[in-house]
Amino acid sequence: MRFKKDAPFKIMQITDMQEIPAVSPDTLALLNAALEAEKPDLVVYTGDQIKGYGVTYRGKGKELENAVLATVKKLLEPVTSRGIPFAVTFGNHDRQVGISNKDQFLHIYKKLPGCIGEQAKGIDGGGTCVIPIKASDGSDRDAACLYLFDSGTDAKGGGYEPFDKKIIEWYRKTRDFLREKNGGFVPSLVFQHIPLCEYYNVLKRVKKGTKGAIRAFRTHKNEYYLLGDTCRKGDMLCEPPSIPNENTGEFDALSEKGDVMAVFVGHDHKNSFVGRYGNIDLGFTQSSGFNVYGNRTKRGVRIITLREDSPGSYETYTRTYEELVGTKVSRPVYDYLSSKAPETVDAAIPMIAKALAVLAAAIAAVVLLVKFL
């Protein structure tokens, strides 16, 4: 990757397509329209490309690999057909299909034209890499840098795994190596799937009953939040950030030298915001897949623009299905119902409890009516 003289370097983040073999035409319509409108220099996929937990991927071994490859080819065709380079990391659901992230990276994504990035040495799995963006003068100087991290999967007993400390140490060594090579820290962006624990620090905790407040769970059980003051006009908080159960110090490492300008994640399909904590912007990007729950026609992609002459700054915005394609979708009933479904098991529990309470009250009322009539 290299800057062009007097031209910005444009990155498109696509996350949470979470697709099945019968890929939604709405997902492809969104991606094609966004790519045509923005013409990015690089596309970064930040996990849950496939619905690995679903029942639609059948078979074992090579048969299963070929089924996943066929789906990924369809999903990435809007990018590969345009000759746009892409990089990929993974979410909590990709490996649930029965193929490791390492094997998906090597035997599926690397088979497609334009796949860049090499798995970090000494790090398990796939989807952790560094992508330098070289200076436009043709030299070997790194003018900016992108890190992709595999942020893990579901934890046993619920929630999400702690962020891998091996990745934190690899990042520190890579950051310091690039500093020595380039005569200073290289302005960087981080992309991963699961949000950092510090994402709650860009939100505003409010009282229960506050209009628009979102209820949180697990480590923030029974707390309520709105977007914080550093978030931007048009940002959306529609579900609580689903963070790891344990904080292993990722944010502290990223913030300690000032090289990382921002982190961009996916994972929570309806959220789309950028807020600042300390010296780092923390950004959420909404999902783009229509075969899984999402924020209806507010599904979209994120654009991040870097400029070589001011590498310490960047610009970002999202493009949605609604503005690029329209308000009609191919399965409106499914789209509506899935948008109302609980986002996680934690969110489902109080909904189920409430439904059972209503059912119990109805049964009690019937019993009383029978008794007294």
Image (cartoon, rainbow, N blue to C red):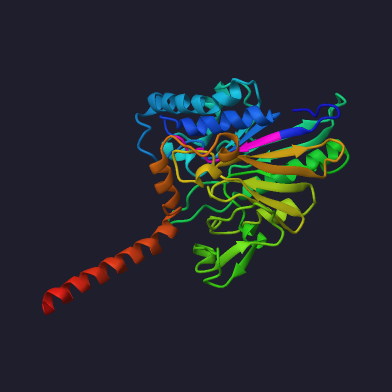
Residue found at x 67% / y 62%: 228
Could you tell me residue 307's position as x and y percent? 81, 37
Which quadrant, please, contains the C terminus? bottom left
Q: What stretch is highlighted in magenta?
A: 11-19
Q: In which quarter of the image is the N terminus?
A: top right
Dividing the picture into quadrants, the one containing residue 80 is top right
Is residue 290 inside the magenta stretch?
no
User: In the rendering, at what x and y percent does residue 9 appear?
Assistant: 76, 32
- Is residue 288 visible in the rendered image? The answer is yes
Describe residue 2's horizontal placement relative to residue 358 as left or right: right
Residue 289 is situated, as x and y percent measured from the top left of the image, at 50, 38
Left or right of 356, for residue 24: right
Residue 366 is left or right of residue 329, and the answer is left
Image quadrant assignment for residue 315: top right
Q: Does the magenta stretch include residue 18?
A: yes
Residue in front for this viewpoint, 96 or 269 = 269
Question: Which residue appears farthest toward the bottom when viewing the image?
Answer: 372
